Amino acid sequence: MALAIDDLITIIFENILKIDPTLLSKYVSVEDQIIFLIFIPHIVLFLFIFGFMRVMAPGHKGLQYLVAIASYVYLLSQGIYGKILIPLFNTYLTVSIFLGLGFFVLSRLFFHPAQASEVASVARAAASKLTERGKKEKHLEAEIRSLTRQIDNIEATYPIATRPREVAALHAQLIAKRSQKEQELSDL
């Protein structure tokens, strides 16, 4: 009977899931192999497949299920699950657990979950301030480039000695305006 169970485990791990034998040797007991090579990676795999099917066929349940089944079968049959995804998913789950624990601890230290809407509104205000600053920065940079082109055009067209007074006055105004815009940009 024990031989039949060992054969069944070999068929599942090596033939169906195509798990690399070196990866199998890392987990000595059958319980560890089931937990770390089937259970945990399948949870993460199903979460990714769920998201993938929702993106590939939004609003069509039948097509979503078809995409999910086809994706799962493809990942298993090509050996991607056993060679690439298991180590990746085990690491992903470990990192996710520690990040979740960190966020939980930080939320308990700095703000209560009931204050989440207040924190979100502060974050939105900060984000709008940053995007407003970025837009103003881009606008000032565009103005400086335009003024620089105009100044370069005047300097290329009229040498200093032969420059008419009106052009010289315009040239001085453009330089003054450019330095004013550069100062505004540095003050941001």
Image: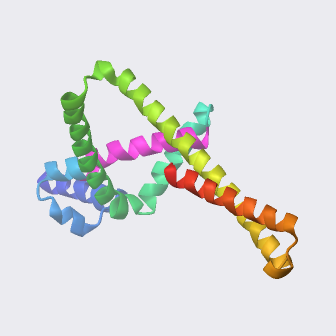
Q: Is residue 129 left or right of residue 160?
A: left
| Figure colour scheme | rainbow
Question: Which residues, given as a range, are shown in magenta?
Answer: 37-57
Residue 157 in picture, x, y percent from top left: 85, 77
Provide the major secondary structure of the magenta segment.
helix
What is the tally of numbered marks visible in this picture?
A: 0
Foreground residue, 67 or 117? 117
> Could you tell whether 108 is left or right of 155 in the image?
left
In the rendering, at what x and y percent does residue 96 appear?
A: 28, 45
Looking at the image, residue 48 lies above or below residue 106 = below
Q: For residue 109, which quarter of the picture?
A: top left
Residue at the image point whose x is 66% and y is 50% from the top: 139
Residue 28 is a magenta residue = no
Whether residue 43 is in magenta: the answer is yes
Q: Is residue 163 above or below residue 140?
A: below
Residue 108: quadrant of the picture: top left
